[in-house]
Image (cartoon, grey):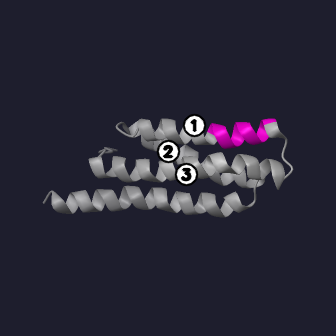
Amino acid sequence: MNFQVTPGMRRLGASVLGMEAIVAGLITPVAITVGGVAPGLAVTAGIGLAVLCVVAAGLLKRPFGYVLGSVVQVLAISTGFLVPTMFFLGAIFTALWITAIIVARRVEGATSR
């Protein structure tokens, strides 16, 4: 399977991952104060996911970056076990991630004709 990375995919994907990094970082204090999650686990999950989002955004020039970005989406949904609202927010970001890839490919495919 040939996965062509386009500039639009990088821009939209990085935008989604950037916003997701902010939300992931903000689940840390929520998990501690509202969810009663141990601080070490909350920091590891929240800040770790935020850093992974930034790393994935930086790797979007290569197809592997999209694999990592997709793994980030699964992990974001999984943080719902710490903060239940993240099941919903993770699903929203996953939908945005998929939409960013599909829309960018369609738009750039149509403009290249």
Dot 1: what SS? helix
Residue 43 belongs to magenta span: yes
Dot 2: what SS? helix
Query: Splitting the image into 4 quarters, where does residue 4 fall?
Result: top left
Q: Is residue 52 above or below residue 112?
A: above
84 or 68: nearer the eye?
Answer: 84
Q: Where does label 1 land, which residue?
A: 51
Q: Position of residue 111 (x, y in %)?
A: 17, 60
**Amino acid at dot 2:** Gly
Query: What's the CA distance linking mark 3 and mark 1?
Result: 10 Å
Magenta: predominant secondary structure element? helix
Q: Where does label 3 land, which residue?
A: 20
In the image: residue 91, left or right of residue 11: right
**Amino acid at dot 3:** Glu
Dot 3: what SS? helix
The mark that comes first in sequence, 3 or 1, is: 3
Disc on res. 69: 2
**Quadrant placement of the C terminus:** bottom left
Residue ID at (72%, 55%): 80
The mark that comes first in sequence, 3 or 2, is: 3
Q: Residues within 10 Å of mark 2 (few under 14, many from 20)?
A: many
Read off the magenta span: 40-48
Residue 102 in sight in this render: yes
